[in-house]
Image (cartoon, rainbow, N blue to C red):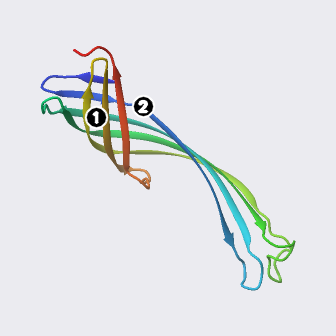
Amino acid sequence: MELHLRRRFSVEFDALYRNSRSNYSAPFQLATDVNAYTITNFEKKNVWDFPLLLKYRFHVGTLRPFVSAGYYFSRESSDSTWLSQCTGKQGSCTPAGYPSNLQFAGQSNYTSNIRGVVGGAGLEFKTRYITIAPEMRYNRPTYGYPRDNPFTGLVGFTFGKRS
């Protein structure tokens, strides 16, 4: 949602959703003379971002570059399941003195809230009935855990007759 103000300024509020799934396996060996366990993990992550931005548009002929800056709130939830299995015959993965077949499995879930500043830059292309606005944003958390990739690529579409 965008509210146009005077002098090429506007205020923008977004609700952005993304999800991801990852599945990976890794060997885990208790001693050098035994077979390894394989630990498999499956994770499902859901993220909602709510940025509030002040945007400024430049006028360069038919092109309309813009910059934006503001604050964002993000809510991230994750569900993980993991399982270990011996890669050899039963009992071949544990050294003497350990229980004969160590197998463990578990689940975890967490929710975190992240807040921070956000800045972006993009370019608007206007046609008769649609405006396309690719944008690159940078998120910098001031509270919560930082993300692996603070950059987000977005493309906005606005439909309606050109005014």
Residue density around tag 2, few if under 14, some if 14–19, many if 20 or more, within 10 Å: few
Q: Quadrant of the C terminus?
A: top left
| Residue 64: x %, y % from top left | 19, 32
Q: Which structural element holds mark 1?
A: strand
- The answer to which quarter of the image holds residue 134 is top left
Residue plotted at (44% across, 56% down): 148
Q: Is residue 126 placed above or below 144 in the rendered structure? A: above
Report the Cα–Cα distance between label 2 and label 1. Answer: 12 Å
Relative placement, left or right, of 75 versus 42 is: left
Report x, y in % for residue 155.
Answer: 36, 35
Residue at mark 1: 53
Q: Is residue 27 above or below residue 137?
A: below
Which image quadrant for residue 70? top left
The residue that label 2 is drawn on is 15
* Residue type, mark 2 in image: Ala
Q: What is the x, y in percent for residue 115? A: 38, 44
Residue at 86 percent of width and 73 percent of height: 89
| Amino acid type assigned to the residue bearing label 1 in the image | Leu
In the image, 50 versus 152, the foreground residue is 152
Looking at the rendered structure, the secondary structure element under dot 2 is loop
Say which residue appears at 15% left-offset and 27% top-offset: 8
Whether residue 24 sits left or right of residue 85 in the image: it is left
Q: Which mark is residue 44?
A: none
The residue most toward the bottom is: 33
State the residue at coordinates (40%, 39%): 73
Question: For the N terminus, which image quadrant?
Answer: top left
Look at the picture and state if 143 lies above or below 48. below
The residue carrying pointer 1 sits among few (fewer than 14), some (14 to 19) or many (20 or more) residues within 10 Å by Cα, namely many
- Judging depth in this view, the residue of 116 and 119 nearest the camera is 119
